[in-house]
Image (cartoon, helix red, strand yellow):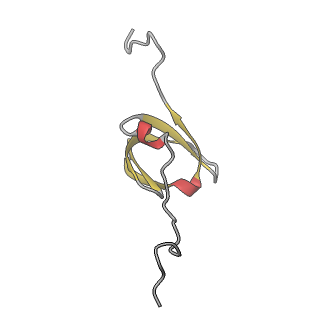
Amino acid sequence: MEMSDDEKPTTRQSLPQFIPKFRGKKVIIRLISGGQPVIGTVEGFNSYEILLQTAKGELLVFKHAIATIEVTEEPRGFRPGT
């Protein structure tokens, strides 16, 4: 017996609006488990994972393990080497 369109569950997950803004930006991710923060550039994401490019290579982080995400920006007026 098939379900009609009215009976089918509507389980469409929507991505949080802030995650697309992180693509290509350098971020600090702190995990729920503690330990050192992970620093890298957001290369991509899906409903469950975020792919980072770190100094040691690519790193796949599961979203359910993330406590905080913070964009790292250089302060205004910052000039490296001065």
Towards the viewer: 2 or 28? 2
Residue situated furthest bottom in the rendering: 1
- Marks counted in the figure total 0
Q: Which residue is found at the position 50% from the left and 74% from the top?
A: 8
Question: Horizontally, is 58 left or right of 62 in the view?
Answer: left
Towards the viewer: 57 or 76? 76
Pinpoint residue 49: horizontal percent, then vertical percent: 45, 56
Q: Which residue is found at the position 53% from the left and 71% from the top?
A: 9
Q: Quadrant of the C terminus?
A: top left
| Quadrant assignment, res 65 | bottom right
Vertical arrangement, residue 5 with respect to residue 22, above or below = below
Vertical arrangement, residue 33 with respect to residue 8, above or below = above
Pinpoint residue 80: horizontal percent, then vertical percent: 38, 15
Pinpoint residue 39: horizontal percent, then vertical percent: 47, 39
Question: Horizontally, is 2 left or right of 58 in the view?
Answer: right
Vertical arrangement, residue 12 with respect to residue 77, above or below = below
Q: Which residue is found at the position 51% from the left and 66% from the top?
A: 10
